[in-house]
Amino acid sequence: MSGVGQDRWEAGMRTMAARDLHRAPERSQFYDEVAKTALTFFQLSGKLLDVGCGSGWAERHIFPVDYHGIDPAIKEPTERLKKGFAEKLPYADDSFDSVLCYSVLQHVADPEASLAEMRRVLRVGGHVGLLICVESDDEIFLNKWTLRQACKLVWDHFFMVDMKVVPGFYPPDGFYLMIAGVKV
Ligand SMILES: C[S@@+](CC[C@H](N)C(=O)[O-])C[C@H]1O[C@@H](n2cnc3c(N)ncnc32)[C@H](O)[C@@H]1O
């Protein structure tokens, strides 16, 4: 793994686990609302890969797409839910119609490699939906970007179709950026 390195990545994962974000009731309500907005906004369809899928919650919200997910924290892998890293996706080129990467890029060791992999597995004309946290100093984020830097990062890999700012869960600093893009 390139980027920030294994040790820092593992420390980041521990911080995230210690906060137990997904089980906090206020977090889960916020997440549900933002998820619904995001999935309408991204307009994802067809065979979809959810990169950094966590528990795979998105499947509930985006049914009936053909859902596949990957995350290093998957405990019981199945044919559709794999254990693995965004930086090295175990899928063929051009094999998905859509890619979702929801609140993950700020936690990966190598964001550039992750975006390059998402682009590789997405078919030409396929849609990508990204949710990235920007303008935050929170220690939970391994990668900290300004709005401008985050846009540049995505723009280097995808044609950005639309962008929307969502109020942050961590006020007063930081907010979420939803980006809908396409592979050209
Ligand atoms: C804030 S959670 C978001 C999970 C899920 N997308 C969701 O919306 O519930 C961040 C996720 O990124 C995953 N993650 C961290 N590093 C990763 C990597 N290099 N590749 C793929 N997923 C990664 C973590 O295991 C965790 O599930």
Image (spheres, rainbow, N blue to C red):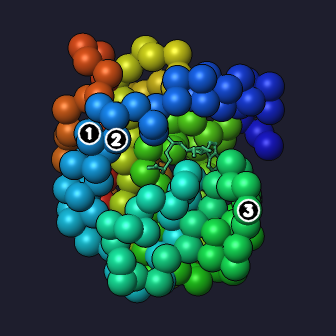
Q: Within 8 Å: ligand 1 and the Cβ of disc 3?
A: no
Please tell me the numbered disc located at residue 28: 2
Q: Residue 112: x and y, percent?
A: 59, 46
Q: Residue at x 80, y 32 (%)?
A: 6
- Looking at the image, residue 84 sits to the left or right of residue 122; the answer is right
Name the image quarter holding residue 137: top left
Q: Residue 138: x and y, percent?
A: 45, 16
Circles 1 and 2 in contact, beta carbons < 8 Å = yes
Circle 3 SS class: loop
49 shown above or below 53: below
- Distance of mark 3 from mark 1, alpha carbons? 27 Å
Q: Nearer the viewer, residue 37 or 57?
A: 57
Q: Nearer the viewer, residue 9 or 65?
A: 65
Query: Is any part of residue 183 visible from this angle?
Result: no
- Looking at the image, residue 22 sits to the left or right of residue 77; the answer is left
Circles 3 and 2 in contact, beta carbons < 8 Å = no
Q: Residue 15: x and y, percent?
A: 61, 22
Q: Which residue is mark 1?
A: 30
